[in-house]
Every structure is written in C-alpha cells, then in structure tokens.
Image (cartoon, rainbow, N blue to C red):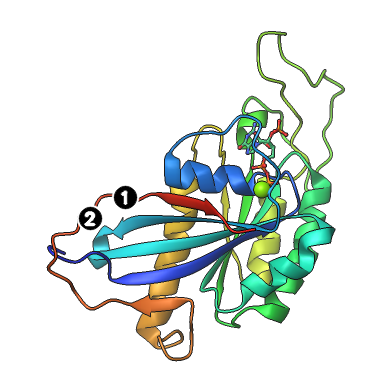
Amino acid sequence: MSGVAWHYVLKFIITGDAAVGKSSLLVRLTDRRFLANPDPTLGVEFGSKLITIPEENKVVKLQCWDTAGTESFRSITRSYYRGAAGCLLVYDVTSRQSFVSARSWLQDVREHADPHLTCILVGNKVDLCSDEEPVGPTGETTSSAPLVDAPSQPRKRKREVSTEEAEIWAQEEGLLFVETSAKSGHNVEVAFERATRDILEKVRKGEFDEDRSPGVKLSQPRNDGLALEASVQTSRCC
Ligand code: G3D
Ligand code: MG
C-alpha cells in the first residue's frame, strides 16, 4: 500500500429519523468522540475518513453525507442519495417509531439511489439498554421496572426493538445489519467497514464501476508520500 493515498473513494449517505444519532455516528467515526448536545442537522453535513481493509490491502476514503431526518428537509435529503455507493439506515433501538419509519426511509433510498447501493441497517443507542431485560419479538417488555437509573447515572431507556426482529427485517430486505452506540463507539467503525467490504465485493463482481456509479471512484496509485493515517474532515454544507 506504500505511496498510495487511497484506492477507492466511496460515497455514503446516513439516513433515518431525526434524533436517532446519525450525526453522532459520523462524528464518532471521523473524530472518535461523542458530541454531547449536537446541533440538529440542517439539510446535509459532510464528513470524510480514510479506512483500511487489511485483507484486501486497500485504503478507502469514505465520503459521508449526513442528512436531516425531518420531513421539511426530506426533498433536499433525497437529492443526496443519487450516486451513493453505501447507506447507513439508522434507527434508535429505544424508539419503535424510528424503526417503523426506517421502512419509508428505505423506500426513499430505493427510489432515488443506485439499485446496487449497499445498505446497512444500524440500530443505534445500545448503550442505553446495556443491562436490559429480554424483549419480545415485537418489542414488548415484561416488567414495569423504572426507566431511570440512580440519579448520578445517565438515563436508561427500555429497548423497543429486539435484535432478532431487526435482523429478520434486514434479511428480508437484503440489508446488512449491526447494532451500535455512537456514545461508547461500539461497532461504529464496524458498520462502515462491513458496508465497505460489501461494496468492494460488488466492485470486484463488476456491479459497481467508475463509469456507471458516481459514488465509487478508483485512484491511480500516487507516490507523493501522503500519509495513510485517518484523515479527518468535517464541514457543513447548508
Ligand atoms: P440525528 O443526527 O439523527 O438527528 P443526533 O441525531 O446525532 O443529533 O443525536 C440525537 C440525540 O441522541 C443527542 O442527544 C445525542 O447525544 C443522542 N445520541 C446519539 N447517539 C447516541 C448513542 O449512541 N447513545 C446515546 N445514549 N445517545 C445518543 P440530545 O440530548 O442532544 O438530544
Ligand atoms: Mg443530525
């Protein structure tokens, strides 16, 4: 890999209801930190990061567009789907409504994005239910235990979407699936890496190529000594 800045640039979009943690996932990926009280996303924000896929000996630059999850920005959000190679479809494991809404976000993605796009369903905020009791297949819980911890602890919430239910739906829809916490960092890089591996597999099979898929760009190896370490960049678009 020596002398190569990156082998591929992949365009990703992050979509899902407002407040499920899309911006927090992006900041966790690019800055390795958790933003307390993030500003609501207006329109679209952008972040980029280099990752390595060791078994492929490839450096991949992820260009991620973080979209607003509110209805008023939905038409702007849709315009960013075009040409994306990957999508993080995010819901909050403690919000059943956000999981129900994932269906309509997926429909938007399917209508406006490349049909070969790799979509990973991401159940975020698992830290909120770390010492949880089991949940039934449709999200019901069995006890009326209080929803808060000791006063000094962060507020805990009940899981409303079981891992099994989300996994089954993801399988039915042909989506990858992972549960994450932007707060602890759990599985955040894994989510992007899993999607990236799947996209590279599609590139190998010829499903994505530079001419047909604007969200996938191949580099010419460069010998300008650019560092391979994670490069971080975030900016606001509108
Ligand atoms: P969005 O971009 O999808 O709209 P944000 O969501 O990233 O703005 O996050 C919305 C709220 O959820 C924020 O809290 C944020 O701190 C919180 N959040 C995001 N990800 C996680 C997570 O993994 N775990 C926990 N516990 N909280 C998370 P506020 O308090 O600003 O509403
Ligand atoms: Mg946001």
- Where on the image, by quarter, is ligand 1? top right
Of residues 174 and 143, the one nearer the viewer is: 174
Depth check: 211 or 181 in front? 211
Which residue is at a point 65% across and 13% down the rendered structure image? Answer: 153
Height in image: 39 above or below 158? below
Name the quarter where the C terminus is drawn: bottom right
- The numbered dot on residue 214 is none
Query: Which residue is most to the right?
Result: 144
Residue 113, compared with residue 40, is above or below; it is below
Query: Which residue is located at x 72 percent, y 8 percent?
Result: 151
Residue at left 26%, top 67%?
56
Q: How busy is the neighbourhood of tag 1: few (under 14 within 10 Å), some, or many (20 plus)?
A: some
Image coordinates for residue 24, horizontal then vertical, percent: 58, 42
Q: Find disc 1 in the rendering and name its residue.
A: 230
Badge 2 amino acid? Leu
Q: Is residue 106 at least partly visible in the picture?
A: no
Kind of element beneath mark 2? loop
Q: Nearer the viewer, residue 22 or 223?
A: 223
Residue labelled with disc 2: 228
Q: Position of residue 101 (x, y in %)?
A: 80, 58
Say left or right for 151 vs 13.
right
Q: Is mark 2 within 8 Å of ligand 1?
A: no
- Given the image, on which type of amino acid does mark 1 rest? Ala
Crowding at label 2, few (<14), some or many (≥20) Cα neighbours within 10 Å?
Answer: some
Gap in angstroms between the C-alphas marked 1 and 2:
7 Å
In the displayed image of the protein, which residue is found farthest to the front?
Answer: 238
Secondary structure, mark 1, is: loop
Question: Which quarter of the picture shows residue 65?
Answer: bottom right
